[in-house]
Amino acid sequence: QVHLVQSGPEMKKPGASVKVSCKASDHTFRKYGIGWVRQAPGQGLEWMGWINDYNGNTNYAQKLQGRLTMTADTSTSTAYMELRSLSSDDTAVYYCAGGILSGGVIDYFDYWGQGTLVTVSS
Amino acid sequence: SYELTQSPSVSVSPGQTARITCSGDALTKQYTYWYQQKPGQAPVLIIFEDNERPSGIPKRFSGSSSGTTVTLTISGVQAEDEADYYCQSADSSGSGTVVFGGGTKLTVL
């Protein structure tokens, strides 16, 4: 059973950056990739992107391109999501989620981290 | 951009059947996945590839597809099924761009 553990809550000011980590246990990096999904307070799920941590390929949601970077450290089984130029609209719970790589892409997510609350406020 | 449309809410009494629909043009070409999310918890995958259940998911959850509409059916609804349900698919380009529906709140009366 794969288990994802995320870093703790963050409080940031507008214009700052945030980096959230996601450590995987029993994650077979060549079989699975890691995606990120966020959920603003009282809102639905929003897909942010994913990383194929085997070859480093990424796919980001168009609206976040230019502000978002996903990386993975296979030596520590940890994935990272960095979001820059934060605004209050970025206040949300950020989830990492693992999914099987099929044809080099992730189509869905089998297992999820516990979520990390990022609050952006002046 | 590609969108999936869900009705905002569904209400049923215990023991009845709940049907939650999701519509989108690319659903004729791509699989649909369903997640259940209870308050304060992370989503849980309950249906993959239109109608397959992961291990541990009760048989009362099932999925079906017809044209551009897919349906999550919960037979014999239980109080513990009250949650938000999200459909999810990928765009038809094969790029792996993922999209979620807006979610449906299931209320068990």
Image (cartoon, rainbow, N blue to C red):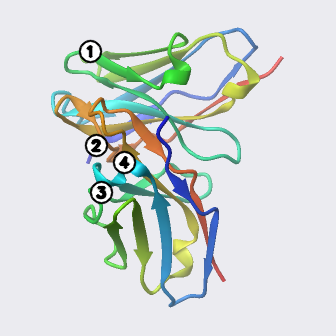
Judge if badges 1 and 3 mark residues of a common chain.
no
Q: What is the spatial separation of the Cα atoms under label 1 and label 4, in whole angstroms?
A: 27 Å
Q: What is the spatial separation of the Cα atoms under label 1 and label 2, in whole angstroms?
A: 20 Å
Residue at x-position 33% and y-position 70%: B64
Residue at x-position 50% and y-position 90%: B15
Crowd around label 3: few <14 · some 14–19 · many ≥20 (10 Å): many
Residue B95 sits in which quadrant? top left
The residue identified by callout 3 is B48
Q: What is the spatial separation of the Cα atoms under label 3 and label 2, in whole angstroms?
A: 18 Å
Please say if the residues under marks 4 and 2 sit with CB atoms less than 8 Å apart: no
Q: Chain of mark 2?
A: A
The residue identified by callout 4 is B26
Callout in the foreground (4, 2): 4
- Identify which residue, A84 or B32, lies in the foreground: B32
Judge if badges 3 and 2 mark residues of a common chain.
no
A60 sits to left or right of B29: right
B56 sits to left or right of B70: left
Residue type for callout 2: Val
Q: What is the spatial separation of the Cα atoms under label 4 and label 2, in whole angstroms?
A: 31 Å
